[in-house]
Image (spheres, rainbow, N blue to C red):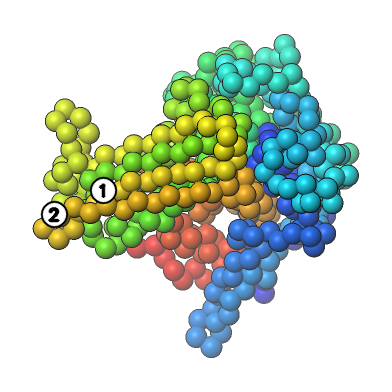
């Protein structure tokens, strides 16, 4: 931190999470246990990763906190909104992700985290029916209540800064509507007119967070901040936004394995991905309208890594994966199935049909038995700490360097920008952003 201009991480950092389910309760419990030295934050880049800074004789590998001023885990204060009234301890026990021995030592702290009433519309998540919700409020009134909640949370806990993280369920798909989402003025007018069709509840949270000077992170595939109106608001308030959709299991594998196929110049006929999942997320995604939102997110990964236009012999019609009157190029299919017996233990299968020399076919099969919340919890921590860092560094708007943690990285599609989904290019972006905020030169440019 010899040359950094980033403001110091003084005081307490409030972390307000939308949704107090399996992911959030696992995240909170892990942080509280780590603070007591009773658990390790395995999987967290901010806690373990080392980045090279300098070259030659000046080369050294440093943790993030040794390059830029990072908030300390001891300074985090948690809060939440949820449609169910259960506190964080009750939620952690109900989720059955963690064993009792890993929850009980921080029971007292978890019990104090009681969710505020959620801004909720069941039309956006039909499988949820909680009663801890705001009632009789228009979209604009929801915004005003959420802003009040943020101010009160900050005041009651003597916080210096707040970050808002969406870790709630996937909403039904909301297509971008230019008339409503194209400008901040149009978005505000729609909220005040109580336009329930174009204004999802998640947009109320994002608007409230940014308006109260809090970075906002979209951990689901919702189009919430993926609209020009929210980009305008983030610039107006000088606050960072990040999204969308935590990259935990199958898409993490896909964004890391697809570059192997591309780098080796092998051809792709098709990639079929299917999952089984039994937690609340799986329940919500069992609704077709909600799954559509997730499907759009998960399908977007391959197309910017294995680009048909760049290698037509490998990925376009010549690859053998096209069908008359249907798709061109490789066939990409994603499925998620709700299967309650697995609860949070998600299982993903990938069948990849590739071809090599002279067009001869081969297959790759990947079976990933993972734990959804165990993989998501460290992403929550990293996204919160790095968004707070970005705010203190004066970075606002879309935070592309956080693409590493997300399935469907935000990008300015109005200007034809292509998102970076290649895991190792995303890692380079992450490292260079940390270097630059720490006063070092970026030295691993993406070609």
Pointer 2: what residue?
A: 359
Residue at x 68% of width, y 66% of height: 65
Mark on residue 353? 1
Q: Which of the pair 380/143 is nearer the observer? A: 380
Residue at x 73% of width, y 31% of height: 81
Q: Which of the pair 297/385 is nearer the observer? A: 297
Reply above or below: 11 against 343: below
Reply above or below: 135 against 418: above
Name of the residue lying farthest toward the bottom: 57
Determine which quarter of the picture holds residue 440. bottom right
Closer to the chain start, of discs 1 and 2, is: 1
Reply above or below: 300 against 425: above
Give the left or right position of residue 106, taking residue 302 as reference: right
Res. 393 in view: no
> Label 1: few (<14), some or many (≥20) within 10 Å?
some
Q: Which of the pair 17/396 is nearer the observer? A: 17
Residue at x 26% of width, y 48% of height: 353
């Amino acid at each position: 931190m010899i040359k950094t201009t980033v403001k110091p991480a003084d005081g307490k950092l409030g972390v307000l999470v939308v949704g107090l389910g399996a992911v959030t309760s696992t995240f909170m419990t892990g942080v509280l246990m780590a603070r007591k030295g009773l658990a390790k934050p395995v999987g967290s880049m901010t806690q373990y990763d080392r980045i090279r800074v300098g070259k030659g004789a000046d080369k050294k590998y440093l943790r993030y906190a040794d390059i830029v001023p990072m908030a300390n885990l001891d300074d985090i204060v948690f809060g939440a909104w949820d449609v169910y009234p259960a506190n964080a301890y009750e939620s952690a026990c109900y989720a059955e992700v963690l064993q009792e021995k890993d929850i009980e030592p921080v029971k007292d702290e978890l019990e104090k985290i009681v969710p505020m009433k959620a801004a909720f519309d069941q039309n956006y998540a039909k499988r949820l029916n909680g009663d801890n919700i705001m009632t009789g409020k228009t979209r604009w009134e929801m915004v005003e209540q959420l802003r009040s909640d943020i101010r009160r949370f900050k005041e009651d806990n003597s916080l210096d800064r707040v970050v808002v993280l969406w870790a709630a369920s996937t909403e039904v798909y909301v297509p971008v509507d230019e008339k409503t989402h194209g400008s901040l003025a149009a978005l505000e007018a729609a909220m005040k007119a109580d336009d329930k069709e174009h204004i999802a509840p998640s947009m109320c949270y994002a608007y409230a967070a940014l308006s109260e000077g809090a970075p906002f992170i979209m951990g689901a595939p919702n189009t919430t901040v993926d609209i020009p109106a929210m980009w305008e608001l983030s610039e107006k308030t000088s606050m960072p936004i990040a999204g969308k959709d935590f990259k935990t299991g199958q898409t993490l594998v896909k964004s890391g394995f697809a570059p192997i196929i591309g780098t080796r110049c092998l051809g792709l006929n098709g990639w079929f991905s299917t999952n089984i999942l039994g937690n609340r997320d799986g329940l919500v995604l069992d609704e077709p309208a909600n799954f559509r939102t997730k499907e759009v997110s998960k399908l977007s990964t391959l197309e910017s890594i294995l680009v048909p236009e760049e290698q037509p012999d490998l990925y376009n019609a010549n690859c053998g994966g096209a069908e008359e009157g249907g798709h061109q190029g490789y066939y990409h299919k994603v499925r998620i199935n709700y299967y309650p017996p697995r609860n949070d233990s998600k299982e993903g299968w990938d069948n990849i049909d590739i071809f090599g020399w002279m067009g001869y076919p081969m297959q790759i099969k990947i079976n990933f038995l993972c734990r959804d919340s165990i993989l998501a919890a460290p992403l929550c921590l990293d996204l919160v700490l790095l968004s707070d860092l970005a705010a203190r560094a004066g970075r606002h708007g879309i935070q592309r360097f956080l693409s590493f943690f997300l399935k469907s990285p935000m990008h300015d599609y109005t200007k034809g920008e292509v998102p970076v989904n290649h895991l190792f290019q995303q890692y380079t972006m992450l490292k260079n952003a940390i270097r630059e905020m720490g006063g070092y030169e970026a030295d691993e440019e993406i070609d």
